[in-house]
Image (tube, grey):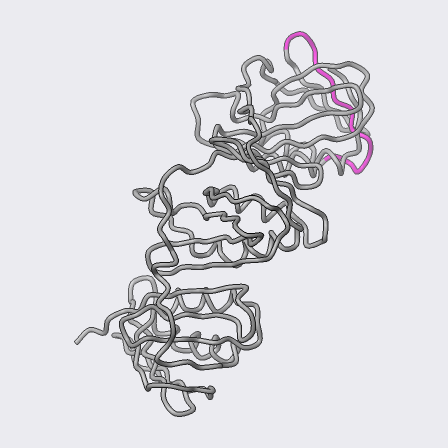
Amino acid sequence: MKFSCQQKDLAAAVTNVQRAVSTKTNLPALEGIFIKAEDKGITLCGYDLEIGITTFIECSVQEKGSIIAGAKLLGDIVRRLPANNVNVSTDERDIIYISSGFADYQIVGISSEEYPELPVIEEMESFSVKGGILKNMIKQTIFAISDDMTKPVYTGSLFELKNNVFKIVSIDGFRVAIRQEAVSCGISSKFIIPGKTLSEILKLVSDDEKDTSVTLGKRHAVFRIENYSIITRLIEGNFLDYNSAIMPGAKTELRVNTRNLISAVERMSLLNSDKIQSPIRCMVYDTQVKLSCSTSVGKANDSIDAKISGENVEIGLNNRYLLEALKNTETDEVKIQLNGSLSPIKIMPVDGDSFLFLVVPMRFKQ
């Protein structure tokens, strides 16, 4: 194998596919990046048996071939090479030769025959969504994914397509995050994408109007983001009927400035820590939301103005869960609905229904 390419192109590709490389495995090949030189360029792939990232770089190929290069060492080398043309070649002993300018490396590779094949997907359905929209939808729901491996179905987000509406739903037992957009896809489907895959999609997808295509198979899905492909396993299992968790109507409703509420909750949070956890007490009445927090290190009180209708209510909330929901609204004002002190609060936009966040209340210690 022998090829030449630009240092910046190779460094970017190696950095991105490296994130799918396994760091804890008994198979040395999975700790490497698979490189294949073809007619018009090279393909790079990282794969940990759950998620695979591949990309293609157009470049000058003098000799076809393939090799596995240790991901960490290869990444460290190409990122530090001079910003010039990079020459890469291999010999029959699987030694990889890398040179750029006066820099010259010889590193040990692994035969490409030892690399596992990526799953072959028999396409069942596919749809496309603007990259900027997909990025925003994932960003606004990924915070509510569970890290509890005893319930693997909630360690990912539900993707739901129905009646030309695309929803992403995340649940961790303490909160629900729902984000939806109108799309023209004409299919009805439900599938669960692992949280790790969603994190990688966020890093690769841009904020522009370019389409990201999603292809579904029985057990895997492929996201095509510009010149990258991410193949991921789907999480199997029955996702919660999230609609049943949404109580219709509201006994109390308020409109409040998002930034003001975030700032007030952050001030109350100063008394909480990983070792000390106490609910933020929120008292909603008349035209104010009064907040207080009492822990072993002290007490704090604050209040902010709000437009309030309905019953007065007092409710306890986890400061981190409330803050994460508020910070992901990305709106100047939010509408908050409550149904007493024991039902989840609903956080939504003042206009429209693009998102809905539910936060389960905490009981006060007597």
Residue pictured at 52% horizontal, 35% vertical: 232
Position of residue 178 measured from the top left corner of the image (x, y, whole percent)? 47, 59
Residue 63 magenta-drawn?
A: no
Depth check: 246 or 23 in front?
246
Q: Residue furthest left?
A: 366
In the rendered image, the vertical position of residue 24 relative to residue 163, given as above or below:
above
Residue pictured at 71% horizontal, 53% vertical: 208
In the rendered image, the vertical position of residue 83 relative to residue 89, given as above or below:
below
Position of residue 74 measured from the top left corner of the image (x, y, whole percent)? 64, 29
In the rendered image, the vertical position of residue 111 relative to residue 160, given as above or below:
above
In the rendered image, the vertical position of residue 264 relative to residue 191, given as above or below:
below
Q: Magenta residues, as a range?
A: 81-93
Residue 238 appears in which quarter of the rendering? top left
Residue pictured at 82% horizontal, 34% vertical: 84
Quick one: quadrant of the C terminus? bottom left
Residue pictured at 53% horizontal, 48% vertical: 161
Position of residue 362 measured from the top left corner of the image (x, y, whole percent)? 28, 69
Residue 91 magenta-drawn?
A: yes
Quick one: quadrant of the N terminus? top right
Residue 322 appears in which quarter of the rendering? bottom left
